[in-house]
Image (spheres, rainbow, N blue to C red):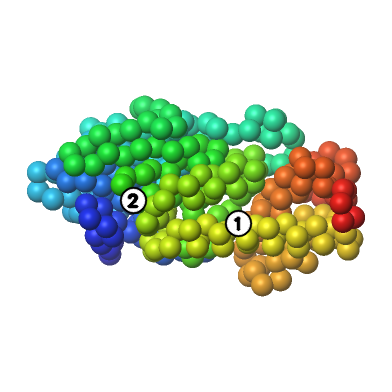
Amino acid sequence: MATTTEVAPGIRRVLAPNPSPMTFTGTNSYIVGSGRVAVIDPGPDDPAHLAALEAALAPGEGVEAILLTHGHSDHTALAPRLAALTGAPVLAFGDWTAGRNPRLAALPGIAGGEGVDRSLVPDRVLADGATLVLPGVTIEALWTPGHMGNHLAFRTGEVVFTGDLVMGWAPSIVSPPDGELGPYRASLARLGGLGARRFLPGHGPPVEDPAARLAALLAHRAAREAAIRAALSAGAATVAAIVATVYTDTPPALHPAAARNVLAHLLDLADRGLATPEGPLGPATRWRPRGPGV
């Protein structure tokens, strides 16, 4: 049974019944405002969750807009049904390819595309800084790529809906070419400059100390980079070998996701002249360290 909770004044969270190692307790769908409301991330295509969203609306309330943080199907797949039911337009930064680094997207052998909603075509495109004005609330869209190129955060007052970019229970996966580490770090820094008092993520509970969480995520990435560089220098030359060396505390079921993060780090290191692939990119590509500390 879906759980509806008021997580901030004028903000209701409806938890989708899709728990997993990648979604934690499930996808958070948010209803923002009253009377004429916005729904942020309607979630998976599940009739029970659609019914829960309907039930969470007060009598006479109407959905003005459906906002998507990014193009992963656990956040977007219910949008067409909810739009058909309510008549509300679907708003997003673009389709699942929007905002990707075209150079990365053109590289052969790096795969990607895990969990994306390839059918996503928003009714309206939200540019960085676009605003939606509802009775008593204004929602600002902030382009925050990193986890995915089309990722948006939404700010209203001192609350920021952070999608999958910032979560309290786990760091975000960065899987090229959909995600990229340079923009990920820049997006975290951008969120840090907002002065928000609370983050509401796409999965898991609210983040009550945004500054501390952002600092922890940046430190985590720096530590992973250092460990990957050390593994490279010690002779772990493939993604699989680096995962086995660095992710010793990670359950094997999550090693495929860890491999995508390692690849993101290696591509970032290559851009900075600190690593280089030996031959064409692919699952078995061998990498070698370069630059200072080698």
The residue under the point 37% across, 56% down is 197
The image quarter in which residue 79 lies = top left
Q: Secondary structure at mark 2?
A: loop
Horizontal side of 192 relative to 258 (left or right) equals left
Q: Position of residue 167 (x, y in %)?
A: 47, 58
Q: Secondary structure at mark 1?
A: helix
Q: Position of residue 36 (x, y in %)?
A: 17, 39
The residue under the point 74% across, 35% down is 108
Query: Which sits earlier in the primary sequence, circle 1 or circle 2?
Result: 2
The image quarter in which residue 121 lies = top left
Crowding around mark 2 (Cα neighbors within 10 Å: few <14, some 14 to 19, many 20+) is few
Of 109 and 246, nearer the camera is 246
- 245 lies above or below 282: below
The residue under the point 34% across, 51% down is 159
- 276 lies above or below 102: below
The residue under the point 13% across, 50% down is 58
Whether tag 1 and tag 2 are in contact, CB under 8 A, the answer is: no
* Amino acid type of the residue tagged 2 in the rendering: Glu
The residue that mark 2 highlights is 158
Of 44 and 232, nearer the camera is 232
The answer to whether any part of residue 46 appears in the image is no
Horizontal side of 195 relative to 181 (left or right) equals left
Cα distance in 3D space between marks 1 and 2: 22 Å
The answer to whether any part of residue 196 appears in the image is yes
The image quadrant where one finds the N terminus is bottom left
The residue that mark 1 highlights is 218
Of 152 and 56, nearer the camera is 152
Q: Residue furthest bottom?
A: 249
* Amino acid type of the residue tagged 1 in the rendering: Leu
Q: Which mark is residue 152?
A: none
